[in-house]
Amino acid sequence: MNRFVRLVMYMTLALALLLFSGCTLALAGADSDPTSSDPTSASLISESEALEIAADHFGIEAGSYDEKTGYMMSYRVLQVATLDNPYYRVALQWMVEMDGNPSHQSMLDTVTIDALTGKVATELG
């Protein structure tokens, strides 16, 4: 067999082995512990979980009505969490009605939620 052909075969085999070993390493990493202290492997809570935490924090269920005004209560995510900034900012709001017609959402309060721990962040430092 020609030297060049053999060299190409060996290089192809070496490349295939490298690609295969990279795939198995990636698959092995998929089962890593999500509670690891490595922030790149940590998982963030979802937006719906953040909304539930906000509702628990304020003690007001989305879709309920304020007793005094009759306005419907809701929540809105103002800031989505990322690994670079792992905090959700959630607003408690109500639908202000004029003459029986919905006119606008009015923000009542906000809460910051740590997306790594799922806890309300009292101080950002």
Image (cartoon, rainbow, N blue to C red):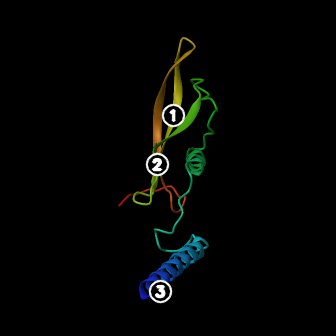
* Coordinates of residue 53 in the picture (x, y in percent): 58, 50
Q: Which residue is mark 2?
A: 80
Disc 3 marks a residue whose amino acid type is: Arg
Horizontal placement of 42 versus 124: left or right? right
Where is residue 70, by image quadrant?
top right
Nearer-the-camera pick, 64 or 7: 7
Q: Nearer the viewer, mark 2 or mark 1?
A: 2
Nearer-the-camera pick, 92 or 67: 92
* Coordinates of residue 58 in the picture (x, y in percent): 56, 44
In the image, residue 14 sits, relative to residue 114, either above or below, namely below
* Coordinates of residue 97 in the picture (x, y in percent): 53, 19
Horizontal placement of 123 versus 43: left or right? left
Disc 1 marks a residue whose amino acid type is: Gln
Q: Which residue is mark 3?
A: 6
Horizontal placement of 86 versus 119: left or right? left
Which residue is depicted at the point 46% across and 33% down? 107
Assess disc 3: are there few (<14), some (14-19) or many (≥20) residues with their C-alpha within 10 Å of its C-alpha: few
Q: Real-space Cα distance between discs 2 and 1?
A: 17 Å
Assess disc 1: are there few (<14), some (14-19) or many (≥20) residues with their C-alpha within 10 Å of its C-alpha: many
* Coordinates of residue 66 in the picture (x, y in percent): 59, 29
Helix, strand or loop at disc 2? loop
Question: For the C terminus, which image quadrant?
Answer: bottom left
Horizontal placement of 72 versus 10: left or right? right
Which residue is depicted at the point 49% across and 82% down? 9
Q: Which residue is mark 1?
A: 93
Which residue is depicted at the point 54% across and 38% down? 75
Assess disc 2: are there few (<14), some (14-19) or many (≥20) residues with their C-alpha within 10 Å of its C-alpha: some
Helix, strand or loop at disc 3? helix
Disc 2 marks a residue whose amino acid type is: Val
Which residue is depicted at the point 46% across and 56% down? 121
